[in-house]
Amino acid sequence: MVKRWFAPDIIMHHRKDASRNVLAIELKAVRDERELGARKKGVQKDRISLIELTCLGKFGYTFGAFLLFIGSETKVT
C-alpha cells in the first residue's frame, strides 16, 4: 500500500472525487549514472509507490509517469 509520506510531484485530479483522479507524475534528477546508482533504492521505491497509486492503490489515478533526468545540466522549469 502507498506510504503516507509519498506524494507525487505533480497531480491532476478533481477535488473530493477520487473517481476522477487523472494523472500522477514523479520527477527525479541526478547528475550522472554514479549518483543514480547511489540513489537506486529511493528511486525504485518512488516508482513502486507511483505504480500503487495508478494500478493497485485506492487512489486509482488513471495515468502515471515517472520522469528521470540524468545529466549535470538538468533543469526543470
Image (cartoon, rainbow, N blue to C red):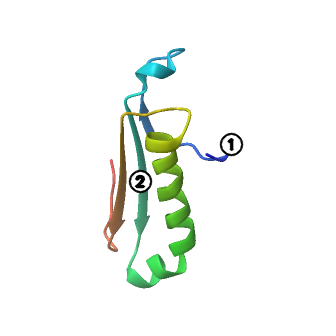
Residue 60, compared with residue 56, is above or below; it is: above
Q: Please give the residue where the numbered disc 1 appears in the rendered image.
A: 4
- The single residue placed furthest to the front in the displayed view is 56
Mark seen at residue 33 = none
Residue 42 x/y as whole percent: 56, 66
What residue is rendered at 37% in x and 29% in y? 22
Residue 53 x/y as whole percent: 50, 41
Query: Is residue 9 something that shows in the picture?
Result: no
Q: Which amino acid does label 2 sit on?
A: Leu
What residue is rendered at 44% in x and 85% in y? 34
What residue is rendered at 45% in x and 20% in y? 19
| Label 2: element kind | strand
Mark seen at residue 27 = 2
Front in this rendered view, residue 57 or 28: 57
Local crowd at mark 2 within 10 Å, few (<14), some, or many (≥20)?
some
Local crowd at mark 1 within 10 Å, few (<14), some, or many (≥20)?
few
Q: In this view, does 24 lie to the left or right of 15?
A: left
Q: Which amino acid does label 1 sit on?
A: Arg
What residue is rendered at 33% in x and 53% in y? 76
- The single residue placed furthest to the right in the displayed view is 4
Q: Is residue 28 left or right of residue 59?
A: left
The quarter holding residue 30 reads bottom left
